[in-house]
Amino acid sequence: MKIEIIDTNLHEMDEVAPQVIIASAFQQERPFHGAAGLIDWRMCTAFARMALDNFLTSRLGEAVMVPAYGRFNATGVVMLGLGSDEGFGENEMKVTAAKISALIRGMRLNNVMTDLPGSPVSRMRPSKRMEILLNTLKNTGLLAKDGINLFIVENSRFHREIQSVVKRFNTGKRGRRYG
């Protein structure tokens, strides 16, 4: 798996061509913040309108997918629910990481763009969230799989912090390189 970290702005997000974009939001997060807010804005507030209609609740583990309608270089956009921002800890991040892994595996995706779940609202450090995501991808065998490109959207002020986590995972068994 190749991992690339990109900034939370539409210009950089438009530079990649993922099959699917994954964003995430907390139940109390209205309007959406960070990458989820930019994605929802570009999608003409499709997710915000679903939230107003109580179709999208952002409960932990919830996933709602809509077509990208040409607004991104992707075929679809998925919004993942993170549950309560006050109760978002390691276990909730593990549930979310498992959901991302299941989406990648189940949809047989080779190019995926996802925000780092919890940003910018979570009190958990970005490095810890990245570590949990990479551990989950490693445990499900996706991290070692060739031909998958994962683009992580995160504010540039945290790039160095999460890049250090990626580097720790960079060499696996038999000298295999990730990213």
Image (spheres, grey):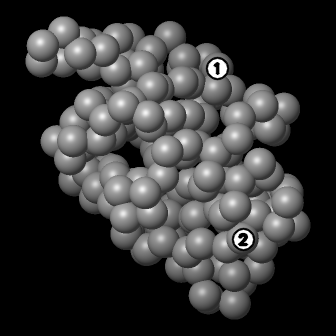
Q: Can you tell which of label 2 and label 1 is closer to the viewer?
A: 2
- Across and down, in percent, residue 115 comes to 56, 43
- Across and down, in percent, residue 39 comes to 74, 53
Going by the numbered disc 2, the residue's amino acid type is Pro
Up/down of 41 relative to 119, above or below: below
Mark linked to residue 67: 2
How many numbered discs sit on the rendered protein? 2
9 or 141, nearer to the observer: 141
30 or 111, nearer to the observer: 111
Residue visible at 50% across and 64% down in the picture: 80
Residue visible at 60% across and 55% down in the picture: 20
Residue visible at 37% across and 64% down in the picture: 106
Residue visible at 67% across and 73% down in the picture: 66
- Image quarter where the N terminus lies is top left
- Across and down, in percent, residue 126 comes to 43, 30
22 or 150, nearer to the observer: 150
Q: Quadrant of residue 156?
A: top right
Q: Quadrant of residue 176?
A: top left
Question: Which secondary structure, mark 1?
Answer: helix
Going by the numbered disc 1, the residue's amino acid type is Ser
Q: Residues within 10 Å of mark 2 (few under 14, many from 20)?
A: some
